[in-house]
Amino acid sequence: MTDASVPQDFAALRTLIVERAADFPRRLTQVATYALENPDDIAFGTVATIAQAAEVQPSTLVRFAQSLGYQGFSELQEVFQSRLRDRVLNYDERLEQLREHTRNSGKSGLIFDGFAGAAEQSLATLREKLDPEQLRSAADMLARADTIYLIGLRRSFPISTYMAYAFGKLGIRYVLVDALGGLAAEDTSFATPRDVVLAVTFTPYASETVSLSQKLSGRGVPVLAITDSPFSPLASIAQTWFEVQEANFEGFRSMAATLTLAMTLTVATAERRASLARDK
Amino acid sequence: MTDASVPQDFAALRTLIVERAADFPRRLTQVATYALENPDDIAFGTVATIAQAAEVQPSTLVRFAQSLGYQGFSELQEVFQSRLRDRVLNYDERLEQLREHTRNSGKSGLIFDGFAGAAEQSLATLREKLDPEQLRSAADMLARADTIYLIGLRRSFPISTYMAYAFGKLGIRYVLVDALGGLAAEDTSFATPRDVVLAVTFTPYASETVSLSQKLSGRGVPVLAITDSPFSPLASIAQTWFEVQEANFEGFRSMAATLTLAMTLTVATAERRASLARDK
DNA sequence: ATGATTATGGAACAAATGTTCCGTCTTATT
DNA sequence: AATAAGACGGAACATTTGTTCCATAATCAT
């Protein structure tokens, strides 16, 4: 008969595993890690398939389950299955349930709910507005650039640092203009019309981003902009520009939509570069 | 060999079953009805348990699957299982198939769709998992700190720069540890137990973030961590830590959930500081 | 009503399953 | 260093599994 105190729900099981993990011997730790990282495999797999994937012997899985107090692996597996049995709501219903959960949870929960809601709304708005042809054109522009100059300061700095990181991973040459040591102008002084400026700024439009971009545009360097209005100072000088509306909560605007667009641009650029290389 | 046109996703399978139902003989109709009303049982059950529950013979289940074009019942079952597996994983698989078809055309719209979906999924997961009490406790910890040391490098750097920007706007003292000029250790050398370290790192865990945080923790500076696993090196040293799972697309993880949490923490900290000031 | 076709139930079967047990290796204790 | 305890891998095993096959029953067509 099963130990009566053994968790029957996934959350409690997960807590138990984490608590016990520090004391597990090597192979049991390996199973614990695999199980928490691949719960679906535990739910649907057999002892044999899971053991193979986790690189342990089948009996180790049984020992793992028994060390937690279950009679055998099958009993443990049922808890992983129970985690999935709750997934009967469609996405909208589930989202509403989640919103209610976070709403009913005090001030911090309300703050989180507000920001999460703003992020979701911003993503939805961008989905509606984004023109794939514009994406294609921007990716092409970036793919053909010798060097991409990333300009985004203050609130937009996370966007440009993210893109620097991602371009770095993708082997795409960039210069991150960070105004460090007051050297922004020097950073950009080598830009030529064979390069591209990618400038990110939102109301109230960081003045340094704007003036650097205008200077470069005046020198014939093509500008790609991410901004929030047709009246943005960047819109008039940019060859291509994206309008991103970020929803506001508590005086702080979301950045989820901008970041998602940034990710898209970096990967689309890499893909376009690969495509151009193939066509040669 | 399986009929190539057989549905691999649940929605298409359900459509097929509904279309064919009118032509099914009695027992197959019975199975069809039971399957659509109890999809979880089909996903997790065995031929024997399902047959019993549906009040048919086991071979009837096999016949049902074969009448739909599957080789056997196990193949049909996998479609029911796919319905329950991680949504983003299915989404990725579907997109991978689409990419197969569109490999020479580099569809930027699909890339955006993938990243937007990953962001939404990440937000939903965080809504589900976030413990408001933990938020409250973290905000209290940050509100009482003399100085907040923000450590987040490489991929996590946008998070710490965002928080630096937001804390700045809110008049909350911080030090942004950016490893500039190799001075990360010096940046943090003034931290005392009256301060707080806010460290952000995800698999594969930027080694500098980890070692700095461990050093500070060893000196009695409380650590608040944002990371992605109970096995993260930060989890064991943090007084409070948040687990954030970011969905992956094209080898790049979303950052929407992490950013939303960061925004929440900054605003909740400001609010808690105001509350503490009122109580004096 | 008769014959042909289809549907059904269930036995047989090979393969897969989860579990137990135990010899050997590893780690901890004295 | 010796001994005891714990961890591990893997063989053995009884049970369960999904599938195939076929005799019989039910349904359909003439």
Image (tube, coloured by chain):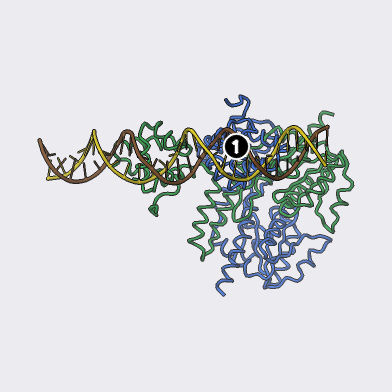
Chain colours: A blue, B green, C brown, D yellow
Q: Is residue A116 left or right of residue B213?
A: left
Quadrant of the frame with the C terminus of chain A: bottom right
Residue located 59% across and 64% down the image = A271
In the rendered image, residue A198, in percent from the top left (x then y), is placed at 68, 62
Where on the picture, by quarter, is residue A232? bottom right
**Numbered disc 1: what chain?**
A
Foreground of the two, B74 or B252: B74
Q: Is residue A96 left or right of residue A194?
A: left
Foreground of the two, D8 or C23: C23
Q: Is residue B155 left or right of residue B4?
A: right
Residue under label 1: A62
Residue at disc 1, secondary structure: helix
Up the image or down, A190 lies above or below A264; here it is below
Quadrant of the frame with the N terminus of chain A: top right
Foreground of the two, A198 or B25: B25
Pointer 1: residues within 10 angstroms few (<14), some, or many (20+)?
A: some
In the rendered image, residue B48, in percent from the top left (x then y), is placed at 42, 35
Q: Amino acid at mark 1?
A: Val
In the rendered image, residue B31, in percent from the top left (x then y), is placed at 36, 37
- Give the mark count: 1
Q: Is residue B77 left or right of residue B229?
A: left
In the rendered image, residue C10, in percent from the top left (x then y), is placed at 33, 34
Determine if residue A138 is in view: no
